[in-house]
Image: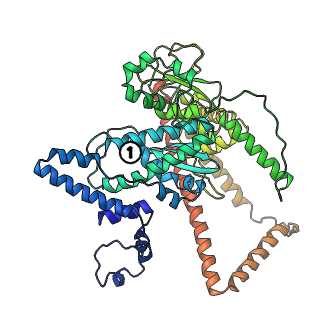
């Protein structure tokens, strides 16, 4: 059963849920896994089945030799251990390279997960090392090609989206925390998936590196390798591990097969695609220009990462968008410059306060890097200073449609992308809030004075009322007036709306029963969407009012 399951995973054969489960299970309601008969027949002709049988025999012979203490037989069997390759399965499942890229999401997520595992008995050390190497190779490719597009920090981990040869690839990397292995997870099943995924990722990395004229396995560029001092490497890691550590530092550029020649940029002629209008061509050109600008987001900026911030994701993101990055040399191998370097423009810190600050350098919280990438522009730094309450981290994977609730932060971001300055509006809001507070304070003072005046006014009003009553009694007959009639104008717009609504009502009445049912379902969905948007807007309003009240209370407390 274990061999069959393993074979199904490798060949990409998944269980099938039958329509009539009880009927297929011969009246039983017990939980069982069902496969299609044609899929199982397809497995009979797989050559790797013989390899699995050979391995089963090998394990039985080895156990027997250990039991009899025949050490020469044990050595002989170990030297002749049967091996197998999954190359032909990869080629069979993915006939073209684009097919492999489309199915790369799960492979990357699994490899990044296994690369963070501790080296305990749950998983083979070789598998963990292989996953780590392949993951780092892929990250270096993304840096070299500047393919990263979106980043999102979630509770599960960090979501990345890159565009590789026109295909969007999304994967998740877990945060680097200590692992507490769950007992309800079958690691053998995961290991089987990883065995296939590592083979696939190896082939994909090979093709991707050659598409960029890079050496594979990757080698650090000679000039950058000189900068990484050998003495520093020896102190940090063993010779066997220093190569992978230098690669995973993500700070150095990779060596190319042929050294690139620096030529002047030539403007290419552009020809319209068949059936494409001039407007579409302009829109495509603008989109391309925006993409090129996004790729060079951090170009010319030099970052320094403090010890307390996550080094690997920040170094990866900054390098993907053309920035230079370094850290303390005791933290990791591959630091290119020190904290005292005067050319540093941004220092990423995650402390409430920085004691010694250098003039001409921004001290920012890590979220600024992630938010700037998603916004496709360098955001204002004032909201991300150390100790400042950070703005909400919005997901770049959510695209609001018409009628959806859009948070005010997203609206502000969209305005910034259009080139508007929403800061003026914010200042006006703050000024108006302050004016309102001042007015309220003045009103409180005025109310106290008015209460005293009210008592004297009430007495005067009583006297006036008595005088008016006396006058009405004296006037016995009131003069009758006739007012001229007014011409009522017809509202054409309202009449048109009434006519349209009546036509719509009649059209709904004339619908067939099935069409009417579908129409009602659509309208119900739309109304539910509006209700949800209104609910979120009300929640946000309540939250904002609560925050304002807290601010007022704190200000009053300070004044007192």
Q: Is residue 546 left or right of residue 59?
A: right
Q: Is residue 309 visible?
A: no
Give the answer, above or below, for where 20 lies relative to 109. Answer: below
Give the answer, above or below, for where 483 lies relative to 55. Answer: below
Residue at x 50% of width, y 16% of height: 339
Give the answer, above or below, for where 229 lies relative to 424. Answer: above
Q: Residue 152 location, x and y as percent?
A: 52, 43
Please tell me which residue lies in front, 351 or 122: 122
Q: Is residue 49 visible?
A: yes
Please tell me which residue lies in front, 345 or 172: 172
Q: Is residue 11 left or right of residue 427?
A: left
Task: Specify the color scheme.
Answer: rainbow
Residue of label 1: 114
Please tell me which residue lies in front, 197 or 323: 197
Q: Is residue 350 left or right of residue 52?
A: right
Q: Is residue 342 left or right of residue 416?
A: left
Please tell me which residue lies in front, 317 or 142: 142
The image quadrant of residue 453 is top right
Residue at x 16% of width, y 44% of height: 71
Query: Badge 1, how many Cα within 10 Å: few under 14, some, many 20+?
Result: many
Q: Residue 85 location, x and y as percent?
A: 42, 53
Q: Residue 384 location, x and y as percent?
A: 54, 30
Q: How many marks?
A: 1
Residue at x 28% of width, y 56% of height: 184
Quadrant occupied by the N terminus: bottom left
Q: Residue 350 location, x and y as percent?
A: 45, 27
SS for tag 1?
A: helix
């Amino acid at each position: 059963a274990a061999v069959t399951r393993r074979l199904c995973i490798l060949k990409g054969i998944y269980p099938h849920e039958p329509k009539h489960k009880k009927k297929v299970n011969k009246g039983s309601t017990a939980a069982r896994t069902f496969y299609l008969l044609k899929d199982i027949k397809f497995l009979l002709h797989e050559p790797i089945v013989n390899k699995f049988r050979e391995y089963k025999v090998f394990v039985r012979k080895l156990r027997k030799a250990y039991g009899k203490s025949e050490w020469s037989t044990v050595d002989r069997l170990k030297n002749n251990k049967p091996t197998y390759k999954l190359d032909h399965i990869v080629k069979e499942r993915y006939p073209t390279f684009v097919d492999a890229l489309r199915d790369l999401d799960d492979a990357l997520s699994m490899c990044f997960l296994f690369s963070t595992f501790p080296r305990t008995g749950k998983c083979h050390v070789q598998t963990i090392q292989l996953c780590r190497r392949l993951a780092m190779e892929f990250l270096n490719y993304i840096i070299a090609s500047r393919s990263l597009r979106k980043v999102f920090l979630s509770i599960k981990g960090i979501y990345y989206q890159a565009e590789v040869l026109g295909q969007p690839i999304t994967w998740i990397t877990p945060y680097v925390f200590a692992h507490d292995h769950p007992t309800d997870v079958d690691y053998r099943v995961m290991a089987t998936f990883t065995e296939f995924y590592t083979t696939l990722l190896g082939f994909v990395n090979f093709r991707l590196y050659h598409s960029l004229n890079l050496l594979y396995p990757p080698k650090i560029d000679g000039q950058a390798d000189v900068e990484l001092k050998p003495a520093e490497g020896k102190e940090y890691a063993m010779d066997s591990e220093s190569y992978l550590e230098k690669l995973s530092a993500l700070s150095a550029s990779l060596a190319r097969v042929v050294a690139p020649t620096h030529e002047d940029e030539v403007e290419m002629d552009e020809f319209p695609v068949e059936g494409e209008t001039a407007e579409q061509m302009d829109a495509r050109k603008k989109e391309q220009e925006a993409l090129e600008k996004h790729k060079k987001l951090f170009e010319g900026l030099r970052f320094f990462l403090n010890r307390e911030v996550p080094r690997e994701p920040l170094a990866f993101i900054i390098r993907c968008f053309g920035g230079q990055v370094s850290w303390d040399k005791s933290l990791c191998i591959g630091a290119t410059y020190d904290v005292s370097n005067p050319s540093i423009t941004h220092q990423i810190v995650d402390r409430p306060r920085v004691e010694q600050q250098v003039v001409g350098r921004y001290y920012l919280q890590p979220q600024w890097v992630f938010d700037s990438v998603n916004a496709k522009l360098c955001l204002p730094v004032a909201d991300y200073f150390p100790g400042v309450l950070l703005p909400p981290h919005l997901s770049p994977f959510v695209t609001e449609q018409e009628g959806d609730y859009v948070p005010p932060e997203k609206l502000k971001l969209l305005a910034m992308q259009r080139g508007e300055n929403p800061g003026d509006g914010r200042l006006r809001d703050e000024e108006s809030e302050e004016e309102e507070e001042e007015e309220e304070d003045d009103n409180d003072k005025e109310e106290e004075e008015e209460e005293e005046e009210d008592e004297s006014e009430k007495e005067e009003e009583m006297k006036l009322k008595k005088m008016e009553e006396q006058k009405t009694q004296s006037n016995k007959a009131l003069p009758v007036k006739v007012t001229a009639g007014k011409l009522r104008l017809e509202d054409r717009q309202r009449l048109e709306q009434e006519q349209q609504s009546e036509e719509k009502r009649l059209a709904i009445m004339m619908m067939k029963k099935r069409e009417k049912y579908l129409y009602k379902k659509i309208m119900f969905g739309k109304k539910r969407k509006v209700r949800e948007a209104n609910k979120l807007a009300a929640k946000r309003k309540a939250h904002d009012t609560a925050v304002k009240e807290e601010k007022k209370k704190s200000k009053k407390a300070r004044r007192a």
